[in-house]
Amino acid sequence: MSPTISCSSVYKIFGNNAQTLLSESGGNVDAKKFQEAGCIVGVNNASFDVNQGEMLVVMGLSGSGKSTLLRCISRLTDATSGKILIDGEDICLMNNKQLIELRREKMGMVFQNFALLPHKTVLENIAFPLQVKGVTTENSIHKALEMVELVGLKGRENYFPRELSGGQQQRVGIARSLAVEPDIWFLDEPFSALDPLIRKEMQDEFLRLQSVLNKTIMFVTHDFDEALRLADKIAIMKDGIIEQLDKPDNIVLNPATDYVRKFTKDVPREKVLKIESIMDASDPNAFGEIAVKKDDIIESVAEKILNSKEIIKVVDEKNSVVGSINPSKVIKVLFGG
Amino acid sequence: MDKNYLNIIRSSKPAQFGILLIVFLLLYNLVPNNEGNYFWRLPSLLGFIPIKINEYIYAALYEWFPLKVWDPIFEMYEEKAAFREFTKSISKGLLFLITFVRELLLGGDKIIDVFVSDAWLKDNDWMTWPALPWTAATVGAFLLGFQLGGIRLALLGGIGSLYVSIFGNWVPSIQTLSFVLITTPICFVLGLSFGIWGYLDRKVETTLQPVLNVMQTMPQFAYLVPIIALFGLGDQAGSIATIVIATPPMIRNTILGLKRISPEVVEAGLMSGCTKTQLLFKVLIPTARRDILNGVNTVIMQCLAMVVIASFVGAKGLGLNLKIALNSLKIGKAAEAGFCIVLIAVILDRFTKAWANKQVDYFENLTFFQRYKLLIIFGTSILIFSIIAFIANGYFDKINYLYVIPIEKGFTFAHYIDAAVDWVWETFFYSLNSFNKFLLTEVLGPMKKAYLGMPVVATLTLTMGVAYIIGGIRTSLLVGGMMLFIAMSKYWDRALITMYMATFAVIVASLNGIIVGSIFSQTERGSKIILTVCDFFETFPSFVYLIPVIFLFNITDTSVLIAAIVYATVPATRYTVWGLNSVPLSLHEAGTMSGVSRIQRWTNIEIPIAFPTIMLGVNQTVVFTLQMVILGALIGTEDLGQLIFGALSRAKDGPGVAITLGLFVSLMAISVDVIVRKWAEERKKALGLA
């Protein structure tokens, strides 16, 4: 199956003569030189795939080009060069009509500052994408009521955005983006404007929704912990370049560049790494009663492993043995050394 | 040593201003005052401009693009200029609309006349649209208010129209209302369209900006003569004058509102799959609706502020009554008409705001009767009151009071006001008179003389110098060019008189505004109160301010200046409160913890931070003052305004003169605006507030 989103050599350069400068450089873009020429590099040679049902988290500090990348893929801005395939079709070549069609049927997006329409109630905001599509008022309101329930805002249908807290507003934003039942879900720093406690709550809510809905997701954040918590894959960006694109545990264990290492340095490994990443090959001595799953986060099973004096079996979803784990390894992760 | 001084001058603005002042004074005293000396007065090289403008207008009206037009009376083709046919059809269309609304409410047969022949109408004199009895209209206003905003608005509407009716102002009020009801939507549509166009296309916006600047600073009077030439006398001319004046703020508000929308909201609209049209009408305009509605509000207020001025070109209604009363110095009658205008302004203001904020209820499940309850009550009440009024025809012999209470028969409080004014007049005559005399001889007279005694080279040096120190060479050249343009006409002396009056009024009004604003903004409640008071005063049409002062100070510069000062104190106060309120709380706290006293906090923290905003208020004060000073020509001053006003009666070269003089006033306002804005920008940047 071909990937849902596929980018190859995507560039986004802001400035008047970006196009000519880019073709002169032959794809080898030096941000400094471009800046001298009056251009700002947003995205520099990004290539990656996101498969059906997969969640890619794009992580980077402000100005790293992560939001720009997201906007290229949703074509809120036009990429300067490169190919962006959505379900095999190049979005950069689409005309306006096809683009609107695509957004109405396949895409939903959540914004950092919620971007709710201030003159519409919760219900009207959620029904909005359906109404612009031409769904009747009755049907769209009906569907919107379903979404209200899904995001847990029942009883506040007739509130205006200004009457809601930040967390509640973002729930509306999420409900709106899901109203057309899109395949692809874009989230642009959706929880960054929220308080830490609410953020945690919304992340849990998001994971719950994703486990039910199973969308293809691109999630942009500047929060490394958030990325680790949510991602199937993480892309770390700096100055428009994707520094590393990998699974969370791989990023923590094998940071590709010094820049990535700065983020991973202080991450508590036991909270991120799965048993899989520290297990050994199947050990014949491990025949105890106790077993841990390979997808368990180390912290959650550490006590269990350390309490037993033996080497422990590691099993997969089907309960067949795939490896073993030595308590000493867990100690090493927990206490270093 | 020399270099050192140069550096000090280069880096210190006060030093630069000091040198400028010395140069100015030297020029002032050394340039001899005699005709023919170009340093004293420039030759009127640009005297041809008004004549040229006139020639163009008349050429457009009578010569350009001749069209063959069929004349049904003479049964032959006639040559007519296309432009004139165009303006004629606009006049006719507008007049038709205004008359239509008017007759709908007041009754008559003019509209029916449009559709049938005169002869037929004469034979069938039953064929006339019945007037709406004021009783039914009052019920209507009550119900509309109730529908829009509950019992409070219902009472406002009901009592308002009851007052208007029984005080005998029903007919002129409806005439004014019909004028507003037609003009406002036109301004709205025009303003919104241009605003959207300007938002979508940067080039359009950059072209619009200076045009709007000129339009908004031109005195209203300047438009009247050209409009008469183009559209003839009548309600339509008043309406067009109002459209010209009320549309620019609508355009500005639309652009401002659209620009303030966060880019995320636009993106959210796009990602929801909006087409361009959907994005515009479902996302952009509704999101910017607060600013757009402010624009609508301004339009309505401008319309009502214009009713008096519109009466000079033939608009009927309250404005005309007010003008007539004022001309014959009937202060009480004028105040009554003025009060009706303010009342209508307030009602329309509140009603449109409530209408804009109404929301739809999706869960409503009502029967037909429940849904249209109020409409049905209204219909029934029209029917009942019409029948009663019709039957009453037999009872009243001459005037049927159930349709209309004519102004002579209505209640009136005019004589109370007259009595009060008389009392004030008799009691304070000597003190008022001596104050007036003192002001004229000791302050205004010398000031006027000083302004008129200024050699043109000194004036130009001063204005360009100030512009240079504040905004650099470009600002200086811009301001200099504008001043030179005025100086090279034959109206420079008049312009100097306008400047002297404006300077005086601006200084006093700004001081008033800053002091009042500072006092009230000490507490949150005070700020709220004073802003409401400002709102209230801003609903007064500019004309109303002239009523009391004429009586108290006669027809002198003092009257006009006091009206201008009161009028212009409003924006100065408003901006002062805004500025002071925008001082961050943390700075207040920091000040308090440093142990400042209240006065120290005001002088050392609040005023410096709020000053850029206050200066923008002063900017507004300049525009307001100039408008009022020009308006003062109505009661007789001898500045530019008088000439503009005089142009009204000069059909031949009137339009050109009026436009040129209006432009001069506008250029003066813009010169100040350019300098102040530049300064405020720099200051804000320096303070890190931009």
Image: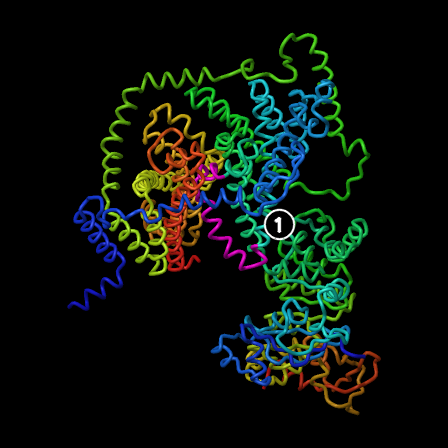
Q: Which amino acid does the dot numbered 1 rest on?
A: Arg
* Residue behind mark 1: A162
Q: Quadrant of residue B490?
A: top left
- Secondary structure beneath dot 1 equals helix
The residue drawn where x is 50% and y is 41% is: B245
Q: Quadrant of residue B99?
A: top right
Q: Which residues are magenta?
A: B198-226
Towards the viewer: B494 or B559? B494
Residue B377, above or below B191: above
Q: Is residue A85 magenta?
A: no
Towards the viewer: B50 or B127? B50
Residues packed near mark 1 inside 10 Å, few (<14), some (14 to 19) or many (20 plus): few
Tell me if I can see residue B510 in this picture. Answer: yes
Horizontal side of B607 relative to B127 (left or right) equals left
Quarter of the picture containing the C terminus of chain A is bottom right
Towards the viewer: B267 or A273? B267
Q: Please provide percent x and percent y for residue A28.
A: 57, 85
